[in-house]
Amino acid sequence: MFWRFFTQLLLTFMLVILLFNQSLDRYIEQKYHISFLQDSPFFIAMSKPSEMLNKIFENFLQNLNSPEIDELQEIESLPQEKPKIQLVDNRLLIHDVSNFLLIGDSMMQGVGITLIPELKKHNMHALNLAKQSTGLTYSQFFNWPETLLNTLEQNPNIDIIVIMLGANDPWNMKKMKFGGKLWEETYLSRIKTILQIAKAYDIPIFWYEVPLVRNKKLSDKIEYLNTLYAKACQEANTSPEPLESNLQIPVQKTNQLKKFHAFFIQTNPTFSPDQAYTPSIMINDKQTTIRSNDGIHFTTKGSYLLTQLLLDHLDFDLAQEDAPLENPTPDNTEAR
């Protein structure tokens, strides 16, 4: 009896592993940066039923839990002669209630803790899609360019995008060594795809520099990634050339972009004034802790500093900025 039960249990376990092998492999690759299956056709075929069920479940949860941006905005847009958002001297001048989209990893979740309440003070709305343990290296685990494109298609009233990611990305990809030529080309193309999507929809985007972290080896790698973000943002602002992509990105209707601008927000002059990781800095003549105990994430004070760095690029010119919102919809501000 025992051996029969044990055999059935073992067979069930092996069947589950076989059916969910791709999900497990992607999780192991994302978590431990190794892959066992190497895209085996047999294992891919065996996992198709579970992948289909997983997509159905994810779509159900997304429709259930993700508020639509057009449900958040209660105030009508201003007449066309006065646009909602203007780019003036490399700053955004906001004339009307606008909708912010937050994307990125757990560091972006940390920024959202203070950014969303500050935006609400100016009658702005925010949709926070930041997801921990994500980035651009393991696109099979989570694909940010694809997620951004789908989100903009489903929520046409998004006005401004804010992004921070990279702490989960300094690792090898399959057959590509971190920092190598092919790795850099692949990673840079994913950054540019995000910027191209924002450009196609004529949406300004704020891209945070990732502050240096306590681990010196990881910090050096993040510093390298920051150079790629800065380079891509600069090129997006100056180059009209479209980027090849496997995503069906809409074609910009006009060559005269009115709002798009890629802002690269430098954080290290504030967070690392001596060009090295520091857990605390002087604020108002008081030593203030800005980084959490893990040496990566932020305290509330640190989050507030990052929020202010973004707000420094914004000017609000709302006629009734201090008026209370009608039927405000709760924002997703959960962070880890």
Image (spheres, rainbow, N blue to C red):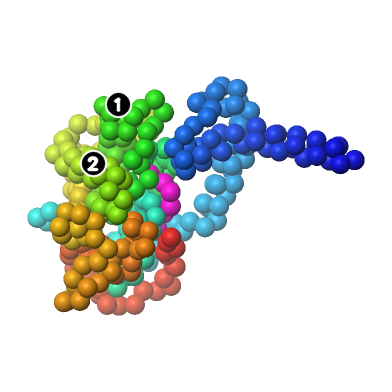
Q: Residue at x 24, y 56 (%)?
A: 277
Quarter placement of the C terminus: bottom left
Overall secondary structure of the magenta stretch?
Answer: loop
In the displayed orientation, state which residue is furthest to the right.
1
- Pair 1/2: label in front: 2
Quarter of the view holding residue 289: bottom left
Of pointers 1 and 2, the one earlier in the residue sequence: 1
Residue closest to the eye, 73 or 12 = 12
Category of crowding for the residue at label 2, using alpha-carbon neighbours closer than 10 angstroms: few (below 14), some (14–19), many (at least 20): few
Residue 194 visible somewhere in the drawing: yes
Residue 127: where, in percent of width, then height?
A: 39, 58
- Residue annotated with mark 1: 182
In the image, the segment drawn in magenta is 128-135
Mark 1: secondary structure = helix
- Residue annotated with mark 2: 224
| C-alpha separation, residue under disc 1 versus residue under disc 2 | 15 Å
Mark 2: secondary structure = helix
